[in-house]
Amino acid sequence: MKFSALLLLLLSVNVSAIADTESAKLWLEQLSKSLRQLNFTTSFVVVKNNHAEPYHWLHGIAEDSQELEIFSRLNGPRRDILRQGAIVSYIEPEQEPYSIISNDVNSPIPTIFRGDISAIEDSYRFISVGRSRVLGRVAQLVRIVAKDKYRYSYWLWLDQQTGLLLKMAIFTRQGLLLEQIQFTHLEVSEQLSENLVQLQSSELPGVIKLNNQQQNKSLSWQVDWLPQGFSVIKSNQHQLNNYHQGDDKAVEFMLFSDGLVEISVYVSLSHEKFRAPEYASDGATIIFNQIIQGIEVGVVGAIPLATAKKIAESIVAVTKMKVSNNTQRGIKGAER
């Protein structure tokens, strides 16, 4: 093949890739718009570890433009999440109902899908692949592909007519399916559903005041390594009752996110000096725990095991980091 012909081929491939990316972004933007602006009633199942968990989800826009949502888990003890605008209420058995101030419902559907998808563009590539049929509808497949080996990739099947999600799958870098969400019913309407009309006039449980005394305080430990794109969302320190030792155990908690995935890290002192790493997986979510030199570290998130292990091993004392940094500055000053 002549050089000019090869150059034209490479250029055409590059142009096609750019077009696929732009098309994917447009589809993801339509998904975000639809999740915020449409009245819909839908059901889906989360399939992982050969187990299916069914959910029911209603969303709508009131006449005053307030968003309304009802999110229910259908198996086991009933758990309902209700939202009126910026107030989200949690209704669970054997627990006093309560509300918090939030614009998002914590559910298996990542919140970034209703937000600005460009926020994760540094960590993921967007690829528009092709069409297929899901739930009897024509669906556009869009892949959200991790740019590194430290996280998973997501495949989304979007309804061609409305842009709403019909199916989602989480894959490893090697193409192994870990978890998927399959929608079993979707209805879009001009009017609010009767349940949302009732929610609109309902009085939600009182908003609780979160204790901020320990929130974002100076912690004793910090994570010294995270995949690129992750940043701290919140951190706090709280006490857990240690039934084995008969006393309270101080635990430091840090929550990180890359916009799509959240990673929780727990650090505490342990009476044990060492415990070999232990882990369990729940679909795409890994639960990792280890004790090294009397420090117990737990990492939970939809990330590969190797990523969780590397995060746990990077835990260092904040005082040690400060001393190390001061020492390095002193050495550099002496060199000058």
Image (tube, rainbow, N blue to C red):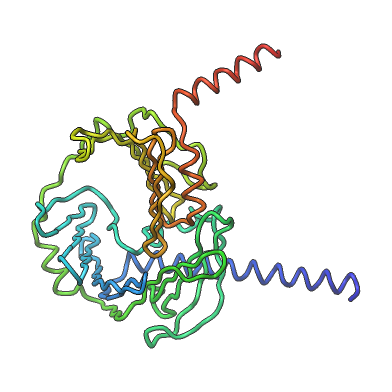
Task: State the residue at coordinates (22%, 48%).
Answer: 101
Q: Residue 332: x and y, percent?
A: 66, 17
| Front one among 22 and 112 | 112
Task: State the residue at coordinates (58%, 55%).
Answer: 148
Q: Residue 22: x and y, percent?
A: 57, 66
Above or below: residue 176 compared with residue 265: below
Left or right: 4, with 299 as reference point: right
| Front one among 184 and 309 | 309
| Image quadrant assignment for residue 19 | bottom right
Q: Residue 8: x and y, percent?
A: 81, 72
* Residue that protrudes farthest toward the right in the picture: 2
Left or right: 158, with 248 as reference point: right
Task: State the residue at coordinates (15%, 65%).
Answer: 77
Screen quadrant of the C terminus? top right
Task: State the residue at coordinates (45%, 23%).
Answer: 319
Screen quadrant of the N terminus? bottom right
